[in-house]
Image (cartoon, helix red, strand yellow):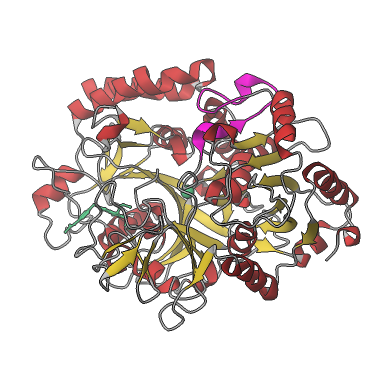
């Protein structure tokens, strides 16, 4: 499709302006076809920038490796450029939007010389869903095009919904590596100087567009696939605030009990808690079933019936590879057997991928690392810091439709009704296995204090320190986190005022990561977490399976049956109130966490801390 065939005048004008600024050799409007996907991959493989894997082992799969400077989201170069600084809040980088645009325009000038500009119309959410939103990404990276094909819905069907004047979020992206006459890419092109990279969000610019995303210099993941973290979380969180809905960093799972009753759960967990594993969990409890709706992002709106409906705005999984094994996530391992893009994993002699903790030692005599070095195959699958075969943030990109446990309703445009929210973190002490909030406000409190303990000593922070990641949204909230808490409170209050308080999701906090005095995990986790999900399921039906305590509703003794290898005493320890631990927790929240939000921290949350403190002393 050609540029002059675009029917949407504002879209056409925006693309023309980008062409004038970035001066690509040619322009292609992406149609989302399989032929286009194959052609984009071929472009990179022919240039020596990707490898087709062994078709007997991984049919339709490809291996790519990035520049060592371009392996993860660049948080220090991610900006929320709101008109007013205070709207970005203390947890985001802020720059004046006019200054930032001037700087970036200077960088974008001529940045696509020698390359093709791809225009990708995409839908976040099922095409035409009331909850879905349309974006258009301009990029000079074929890698971005085929990953967007997997992660979003791309093509002419999106332009049809957009019509002549529909709403879209413009998303500009360049890898920032123009090519001279006859020059060819030899390695992953990008801007290796971190200080020149920008991942910029304009949440309230008053130019042609209210919401904009401008990304420069990185070709990797969340910096470059702009539908995901940039649109579906940072910009969508602002849209959700403005329009009265929720854009959250949450998995969505479908839980079926032995009687065949169904509930949907949405859950926010910080990184390294196994969110994708939870979304695809295989229950050990007989008769229970978990199916997946999404593993990373949930967009939720109240329906006319007063229930909260969620869609997964994505169409694929962009999962962390290391640690994924038949033990941690059999469903993910089965999903990535075909038609999958692997980035920064190891490559085996027989043309397959490999990574640390994949569950088996690397086959063959040698293996190629993500940096392209041939090294002796390790005898175990254990990670050795500094000598990784796969980069710790290496990824698979796979269509969600290939997941054997994807729920049949995962693409239902009206979404699924959410019965429960779950928050959690990696906490060695204090925080119980599971705890239900006493109210909506108390649930928002739980979300706001979400966090994990630091394990990496290299971070120059004392091990055992809690790094708070409220609602797992710290890197993804496009506005002031204090206003974000207030937005959550407001939605709950509105539902209650309308008489729909009982239809609000129940809120839970989970912790799979408690350790005993010897530093051993006290809970087996993984499939055994189904026992906790089953308890939550019954809580949603108001079953008599809990005890009220100062910190929330905890499991009644016997209401969660101990898994094999876990003693009744251990389970009791996991589900009791650690009074001294909670006193320290409250002090930490007050002094180190809530204090940073100043006046914007809703008073209800402070009040709740005081109530909790008093009850613990009583
Ligand atoms: O994903 C995890 N989950 C959720 C699964 C649905 N992980 C991996 C976290 C890193 C991404 C877990 N790790 C979980 C868990 O529930 N629990 C643990 C901690 C743990 C590790 C090993 C054991 C037990 C617990 N091993 C034995 O019990 C033998
Ligand atoms: Mn995520």
Question: Is 88 contained in the magenta span?
Answer: yes
Q: How many marks?
A: 0
Q: Residue placed at 25% from the left, 54% from the top?
A: 383
Q: Quadrant of residue 28?
A: bottom right
- In the rendered image, the vertical position of residue 178 relative to residue 49, given as above or below: above
Q: Residue placed at 65% from the left, 28% from the top?
A: 81
Q: Residue furthest bottom?
A: 56
Q: Image quadrant for the C terminus? A: top left
Residue 126 visible in the current orientation: no
Q: Which one is in front, 135 or 527?
A: 135
Q: Which one is in front, 79 or 131?
A: 79
The answer to whether residue 347 is left or right of residue 111 is: left
Residue 548's spot in the image, x, y percent? 28, 38
Q: Quadrant of residue 44?
A: bottom right
Q: Residue furthest front?
A: 182
Residue 368's spot in the image, x, y percent? 36, 63
Q: Which one is in front, 293 or 354?
A: 354
Q: Residue placed at 45% from the left, 19% from the top?
A: 596
Question: Is 574 contained in the magenta span?
Answer: no
- In the rendered image, the vertical position of residue 618 relative to residue 320, given as above or below: above
- In the rendered image, the vertical position of residue 137 relative to residue 214, given as above or below: below
- Which region is colored magenta? 74-94
Q: Image quadrant for the N terminus? A: bottom right
Residue 514's spot in the image, x, y percent? 21, 44
- In the rendered image, the vertical position of residue 217 relative to residue 414, given as above or below: above
Q: Which one is in front, 495 or 269?
A: 269
Q: Quadrant of residue 280?
A: bottom left
């Amino acid at each position: 499709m050609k540029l002059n065939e675009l029917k949407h005048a504002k879209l056409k004008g925006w693309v023309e302006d980008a062409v004038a600024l970035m001066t690509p050799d040619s322009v292609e409007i992406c149609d989302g076809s399989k032929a286009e996907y194959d052609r984009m991959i071929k472009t990179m493989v022919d240039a020596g920038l990707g490898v087709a894997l062994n078709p007997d082992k991984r049919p339709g799969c490809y291996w790519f490796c990035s520049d060592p400077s371009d392996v993860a989201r660049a948080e220090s170069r991610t900006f929320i450029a709101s008109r007013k600084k205070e709207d970005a809040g203390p947890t985001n980088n802020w720059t004046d939007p006019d200054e930032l645009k001037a700087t970036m325009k200077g960088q974008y000038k001529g940045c696509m010389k020698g390359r093709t500009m791809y225009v990708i119309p995409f839908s976040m959410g099922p095409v035409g869903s009331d909850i879905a939103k349309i974006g258009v990404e301009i990029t000079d990276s074929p890698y971005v095009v085929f990953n967007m094909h997997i992660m979003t819905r791309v093509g002419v069907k999106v332009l049809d919904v957009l019509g002549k004047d529909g709403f879209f979020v413009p998303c500009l992206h360049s890898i920032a590596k123009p090519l001279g006459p006859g020059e060819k890419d030899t390695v992953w092109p990008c801007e290796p100087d971190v200080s020149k990279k920008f991942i910029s969000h304009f949440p309230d610019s008053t130019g042609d567009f209210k919401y904009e995303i401008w990304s420069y210099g990185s070709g990797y993941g969340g910096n470059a696939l702009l539908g995901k973290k940039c649109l579906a979380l940072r910009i969508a969180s602002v849209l959700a605030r403005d329009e009265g809905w929720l854009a959250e960093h949450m998995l969505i799972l479908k839980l079926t009990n032995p009687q065949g009753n169904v509930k949907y759960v949405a859950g926010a967990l910080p990184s390294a808690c196994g969110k994708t594993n939870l979304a695809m969990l295989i229950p050990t409890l007989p008769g229970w079933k978990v199916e997946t709706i999404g593993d990373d992002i949930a967009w939720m709106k109240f329906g006319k019936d007063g229930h909260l409906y969620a869609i997964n705005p994505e169409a694929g999984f962009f999962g962390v590879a290391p640690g994924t094994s038949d033990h941690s996530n059999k469903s993910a391992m089965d999903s990535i057997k075909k038609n999958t893009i692997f980035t920064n994993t190891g490559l085996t002699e027989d043309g397959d991928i490999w990574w640390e903790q994949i569950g088996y030692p690397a086959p063959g005599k040698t293996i190629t690392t993500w940096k392209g070095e041939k090294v002796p195959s390790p005898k175990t699958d254990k990670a050795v810091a500094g000598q990784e075969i796969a980069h710790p943030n290496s990824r698979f990109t796979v269509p969600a439709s290939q997941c054997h446990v994807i729920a049949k309703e995962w693409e239902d445009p009206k979404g699924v009704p959410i019965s429960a929210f779950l928050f959690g973190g990696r906490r060695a002490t204090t925080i119980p296995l599971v705890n239900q909030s006493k109210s909506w406000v108390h649930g928002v409190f739980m979300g706001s204090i979400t966090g994990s303990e630091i394990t990496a000593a290299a971070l120059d922070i004392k091990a055992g320190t809690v790094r708070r990641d409220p609602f797992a949204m710290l890197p993804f909230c496009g506005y002031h986190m204090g206003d974000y808490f207030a937005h959550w409170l407001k939605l709950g209050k509105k539902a209650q005022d309308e008489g729909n308080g009982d239809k609000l999701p129940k809120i839970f906090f989970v912790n799979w990561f408690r350790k005993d005095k010897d530093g051993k995990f006290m809970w087996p986790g993984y499939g055994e977490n189904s026992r906790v999900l089953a308890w939550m399921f019954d809580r949603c039906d108001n079953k008599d399976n809990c005890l009220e305590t100062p910190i929330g509703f905890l499991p009644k003794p016997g209401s969660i049956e101990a898994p094999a290898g876990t003693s009744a005493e251990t389970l009791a320890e996991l589900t009791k109130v650690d009074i001294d631990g909670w006193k320290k927790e409250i002090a930490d929240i007050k002094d180190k966490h809530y204090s940073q939000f100043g006046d914007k921290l809703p008073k209800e949350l402070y009040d709740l801390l005081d109530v909790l403190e008093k009850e613990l002393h009583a």
